[in-house]
Amino acid sequence: MKILIADDEPIARQVLREHIESIPMLEIAGEAGTGAETLACIFELKPDIVLLDLQMPELGGLGVVRSLRGSGSPAVIFVTAYEKHALEAFEVGAIDYLLKPVRRERLEKAIAKAARQLQSAPRAVPTLHKVVGRRGRDMYLLDPSEIVAFEADGDLVHVVTGGERYLSDHSLKELLEQLDPRSFRRIHRATIINADHIRRISPLSSKRWLLKMSNGYEAVVSKRLGKSIRESRW
């Protein structure tokens, strides 16, 4: 099983890493030090289990879990120095709640519990409530509803919102697999649009239609696809 370690304290991550490396059949998928990094790692690495600190910069552990939905989300084991959030942790679907310093025996029991749950339910691709966009060294948590389109330009993928552009770490294929198919449609090889932002559909020719989006963004689609979008959204 692949484990993602998410904690803003390097020493805490080291302790968990050493425990995991000593337990057979476990693999460290990666490490994250902030809530935004955790979401990005879940998106990219698709771990089976996340060892998640409750208090992290940018977005706490509870916020990370609330940003995920779907039966395919990884199993979450909270790791924290405080007991006061235990009830809330279980309410958001955590498998277990470990107090620091974490003992290996206690961690093994929590992972075994998570493994049983993963085996009892088929994996599905999670749909994210948040998309991570980058600008320079900063990361932004974007609500899918504010995203107008995704554009591929060679190896780069741009996230287009009402008034801003960001870079995504993921391909259009990966994004399309993670986002709500009722809203996000791939209209051709280099573009995904959010159909909720379409404001006008106009015929260009007998075979092509023009989509006008809420921020002025324009995209050309086939007549068949334009008709399909129109019938499904309006």
Image (cartoon, grey):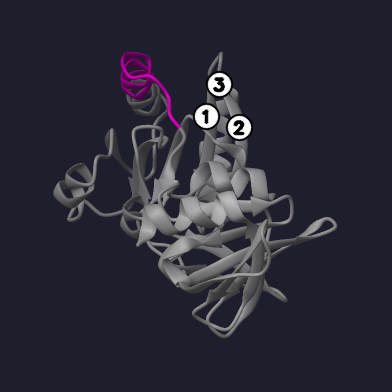
Closer to the camera in the image, 101 or 42: 42
Position of residue 14 measured from the top left corner of the image (x, y, whole percent)? 58, 43
The three-letter code of the residue at mark 1 reads His
The Cα–Cα distance between marks 1 and 3, rounded to whole angstroms, is: 10 Å
Q: Which mark is residue 26?
A: 3
Question: Residue 58, can we see it?
Answer: no
Which residue has dot 1 on it? 19
Q: Quadrant of the C terminus?
A: bottom left
**Which three-letter amino acid code belongs to the residue tagged 2?**
Ile
Please, what is the dominant secondary structure of the magenta stretch?
helix
Asked if the residue under mark 3 is in contact with the one under mark 2, i.e. CB atoms within 8 Å, the reply is: yes
What are the residue bounds of the magenta stretch? 112-124
Q: Could you say where residue 156 lies in the image, as x and y percent from the top left?
A: 78, 61
Instruction: Measure the C-alpha gap from mark 1 to mark 2.
Output: 11 Å
- Three-letter amino acid code at the position of disc 3: Leu
Residue behind mark 2: 28
Residue, x 66% and y 50% (percent of image)?
172
Name which residue lies at 45% across and 39% down: 50
On the image, the x and y values in percent for residue 103 come to 39, 32
